[in-house]
Image (spheres, rainbow, N blue to C red):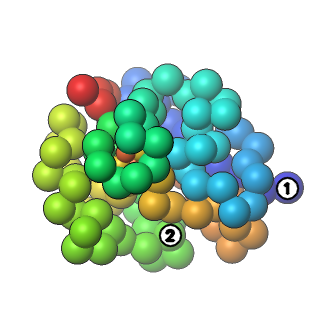
Amino acid sequence: MTEVIFVSANGEKTTVEANAGDTVMQTALAANISDIIAECGGAMMCATCHVYVDDDWLERVGKADEDELTMLDFASSEVKPTSRLSCQIKVDDENSGMIIHLPDSQL
Ligand code: FES
């Protein structure tokens, strides 16, 4: 089983089953995680799918590339070294169980 653990800004944890190959954003929407909006549907044009990858998972998940960083400039919450656009993170067996922190706001 592939899963993603979402942690809201107030510390509430939700473990969600994911389909390998889906993005973290798709996984969140399918599970009604309301802290991810994903206005552009994954086209990397909105930054309303901004998340923070847990420190312990960042190396495995990887950091944002240049294009993603450019889009993250439009994120409404603070951008940190662990910031990613969740539509650009694919879930697979390698990163199953990854912990994703949600920002306090997307708009
Ligand atoms: S869903 Fe719009 S940038 Fe990720």
Please tell me the numbered disc located at residue 32. none
Vertical comparison of 101 with 23: above or below: above
| N-term-proximal mark, 1 vs 2 | 1
**Can you tell which quarter of the image residue 46 is in?**
top left
The answer to whether 74 appears left or right of 9 in the picture is left
Q: Which residue is mark 2?
A: 61
Tell me if I can see residue 49 in this picture. Answer: no
Q: Residue at (43%, 73%) from the top-left corner?
A: 62
Tell me if I can see residue 70 in this picture. Answer: yes
Q: Disc 2 residue type?
A: Val
Q: Disc 1 residue type?
A: Met
Give the Cα separation between the discs numbered 1 and 2.
18 Å
Q: Which residue is mark 1?
A: 1
Q: Nearer the viewer, residue 70 or 9?
A: 70
Q: CB of residue at label 1: within 8 Å of ligand 1?
A: no
Describe the element under mark 1 as helix, strand or loop.
loop
Residue 93 coordinates in the image, percent (x, y): 75, 69
Q: Residue at (29%, 49%) from the top-left corner?
A: 45
Vertical comparison of 93 with 74: above or below: below
Residue 106 coordinates in the image, percent (x, y): 29, 31
Q: Residues within 10 Å of mark 2 (few under 14, many from 20)?
A: some
Vertical comparison of 74 with 84: above or below: above
